[in-house]
Structure formats: structure tokens, C-alpha cells
Image (tube, grey):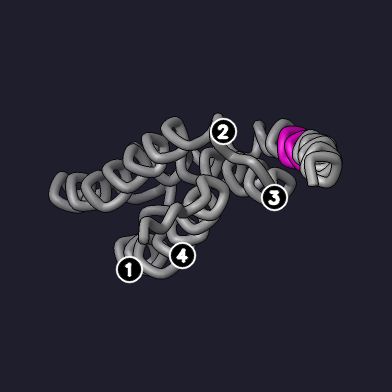
Amino acid sequence: MKVKINSSLIVFGTSILTILYFFVIVSPFIEMYGLLSENTIQSKATKISYFCLTTPVFIAYAGVILCYFRRITFFKCINYPLIVTNVYFGTFACLMVFGGSVLWLMVATFFFFILSFFGSFFVGIFKDIHYFRRWRLSK
């Protein structure tokens, strides 16, 4: 018996695991080494270890999303905002290797993040409604 896992669940699970990874593993590392501080210059070893901690995970997440994005069939109203959130915060988490002053870019672009978050939520709702109407008519 062959089990087919839906792409929507793969994207949802990957998004949740990525959020948990950045909160549980990366956040304590940031606090431990003071990467949020604009006044201190981090050592090269700290920068390399932080780069290795964040960038491969973010690239793998982007690869999974690019692979499965077109195949998401339902719960787009949940998956789309999760993707927008992970890409926004993941990008800045990876850019923090250059120092805490990069977070000022995050402050400057936060309005656009909020707009894209709610926009993706409403687009996902409309696509979910369309999907469930077609599904109900095909029964």
C-alpha cells in the first residue's frame, strides 16, 4: 500500500519545524553571543558558526517551498502566511551574520511584511474557498 502525503501538509510541517528551529536553537545562540548588539564586533569563529547554523536551514526550507509551492491544494490561508513569515524572519536571521545593525532594515520593512502577511492570508482564503467549492461539486 502506497501512502501519498499531501503537499499542503509537507509545506505546513516544514514551516512549523523551521519556526521551531529558529526559536529553539538559533535564538539562544543569538542571546549567548550577543549578536543583537550594535556595539560589539563578533569574532570570525562566531560569525562562521552562526552562518552555518542559519543559512543551510534557510536554503533547505526555500528549496522545499519552491518544490512544493505549486502543489499546495488546501489550507492555503495557513500555509501562505507561514511561508511569508518564515522568509521574512529567516532572511533577517541569515543577514544578522553582518551584525545587529541589520535589524534596522527589519524595522524599515515591517510595514511591507504586515501587508504581505495579510494579503497572503486573504489570497489563501479565496483560493481555499474556490478549491472546496470545486471539491464539493465533484462529489
- Residue hosting label 3: 75
User: What element does badge 4 sit on?
Assistant: helix
- Left or right: 12 in relation to 74: left
In 3D space, how far apart are the residues under numbered discs 4 and 2 (Cα atoms)? 23 Å
Residue beneath the point at 55% across and 30% down: 70
The label nearer to you, 4 versus 2, is 4
The label nearer to you, 1 versus 3, is 3
The label nearer to you, 2 versus 3, is 3
In 3D space, how far apart are the residues under numbered discs 3 and 4 (Cα atoms)? 20 Å
Percent x, y of residue 76: 69, 44
Disc nearer the start of the sequence (1/2): 1
Answer above or below: position of 28 versus 52: below
Disc nearer the start of the sequence (4/2): 4
- Observer-nearest of 128 and 84: 128
Q: Main secondary structure of the magenta part?
A: helix
Disc nearer the start of the sequence (1/3): 1
- Left or right: 89 in relation to 60: right
- Residue hosting label 1: 32
Specify whether residue 78 is painted magenta: no
Q: Amino acid at mark 1?
A: Met
- Left or right: 114 in relation to 67: right
Q: Is residue 114 visible?
A: no
